Image (cartoon, rainbow, N blue to C red):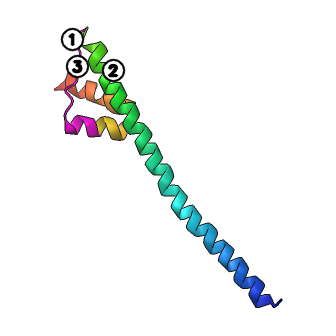
Amino acid sequence: MNFSVVLAYAFGLMLLYLIGMLLVIPIKIIIKLIINGILGGVTLLLVNLIGGLFGLHIVINPINALIAGFLGIPGVILLFILQAIL
């Protein structure tokens, strides 16, 4: 076995590893966004259900859903603060 063949295999394995890492990192970001979206949506719904008893509610529209979806629970808190200020 030539040294060039071993070197080619090593380069191929390193390239395969780098491509694998480039594919894994965006998947982690997408999974984090999905989890934040689910938590934000559920929190927004629960706040409207429970807060309705106390007179606290946040209108669910596309902008509020996006804020709660991207930021999660802190997004719902931000919506409450914005509602109190405005």
Residue that sits furthest to the top in the current view: 53
- Mark 3 vs 1: CB contact within 8 A: yes
For residue 46, the mark is 2
**63 displayed left or right of 27:** left
Q: Quadrant of residue 73?
A: top left
Callout 3, which amino acid?
His
Residue for badge 3: 57
Callout 2, which amino acid?
Leu
Q: Is residue 9 above or below residue 75?
A: below
Instruction: Name the spot of residue 81 as percent of width and height, x first.
Output: 27, 25
Instruction: Name the spot of residue 13 as percent of width and height, x first.
Output: 68, 73
Residue that sits furthest to the left in the current view: 86
Alpha carbon of mark 3 to alpha carbon of mark 1: how far?
Answer: 6 Å
Magenta residues span 54-66
**Neighbour tally class for label 2: few under 14, some 14-19, many 20 plus, Cα within 10 Å:** few
Whether residue 3 is in magenta: the answer is: no
Instruction: Name the spot of residue 52 as percent of width and height, x first.
Output: 24, 13
For residue 55, the mark is 1
Image quarter where the C terminus lies is top left
- Kindly identify the residue that appears in the image at 30 percent across and 24 percent down: 45
Callout 1, which amino acid?
Gly
